[in-house]
Image (cartoon, helix red, strand yellow):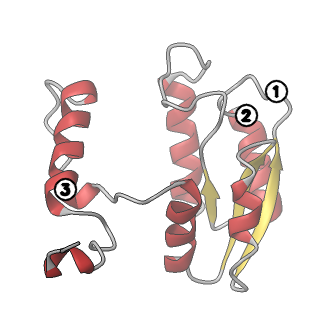
Amino acid sequence: MTIPEAELEYAPVTGLQELRVKVADYYNHLYRQGKSSQYTPDNVCVVPGGRAGLTRIMAVLGNVNIGYFTPDYTAYEQCLGLFLRISPSPLLHRDVNDALMDPKEFEFQVKGAGLGSVLLSNPANPTGKQSNCGVTNTSFSFFVFVWNRSYMT
């Protein structure tokens, strides 16, 4: 068996440039048509799975109290526990069928826990679509307002 020498090397940490271009183009086609801002390969990182992606994110954060919703993706607790400089803090989600908690409850929990970051994702809303998850532009804007006001990442 002969393997070309170029194929014996690892791929770039963020993924192959050609693949990142295709992913950016795909998301622009699906979600950004007619919008002035478009994704570029610089906005894309290709990882071999969820845990690897979360681990990369955690590796670049400094000393921080990071909130995550419970119940949620089980890898969160595992990945958050790998880094001593990260203090995980669960945000208790009362209704697991909603993508996000009530904005006022979110603000209360963020302030109470002194969070510097929040890990957002939810099995109830894996695609981020607003149509069926109860998140309005107003409520999402409030989440962003809380993040900005709290200097969160």
Given the current orientation, which residue lies at the most extreme front position?
1
Task: Give the structural element (helix, strand or loop) at label 2.
Answer: loop
Q: Residue at x 28, y 72 (%)?
A: 11
Residue 94 in which image quadrant: top right
For badge 2, the amino acid type reads Met
Task: Tell me, yes or no, whether the two marked residues, 2 and 1, touch with CB atoms within 8 Å.
Answer: yes
Residue 41 is tagged as 3
Task: Give the structural element (helix, strand or loop) at label 3.
Answer: helix
The 10 Å Cα crowd at callout 1, few under 14, some 14 to 19, many 20 or more, is few
For badge 3, the amino acid type reads Pro
- Residue annotated with mark 2: 101
Residue 13 is tagged as none
Specify whether residue 30 is in view: yes
Quarter of the image that includes the N terminus: bottom left
Circle nearer the N terminus (3, 1):
3
Which of 151 and 54 lies nearest the eye of the viewer?
A: 54
For badge 1, the amino acid type reads Asp
Residue 133 rendering spot, x and y as whole percentages: 60, 20
Which of 94 and 121 lies nearest the eye of the viewer?
A: 121
Which of 105 and 119 lies nearest the eye of the viewer?
A: 119
Residue 78 rendering spot, x and y as whole percentages: 75, 65
Mark closer to the observer (3, 1): 3
Q: Residue at x 20, y 74 (%)?
A: 3
Task: Give the structural element (helix, strand or loop) at label 1.
Answer: loop
Alpha carbons under labels 3 and 1: distance apart: 36 Å
- Residue annotated with mark 1: 95
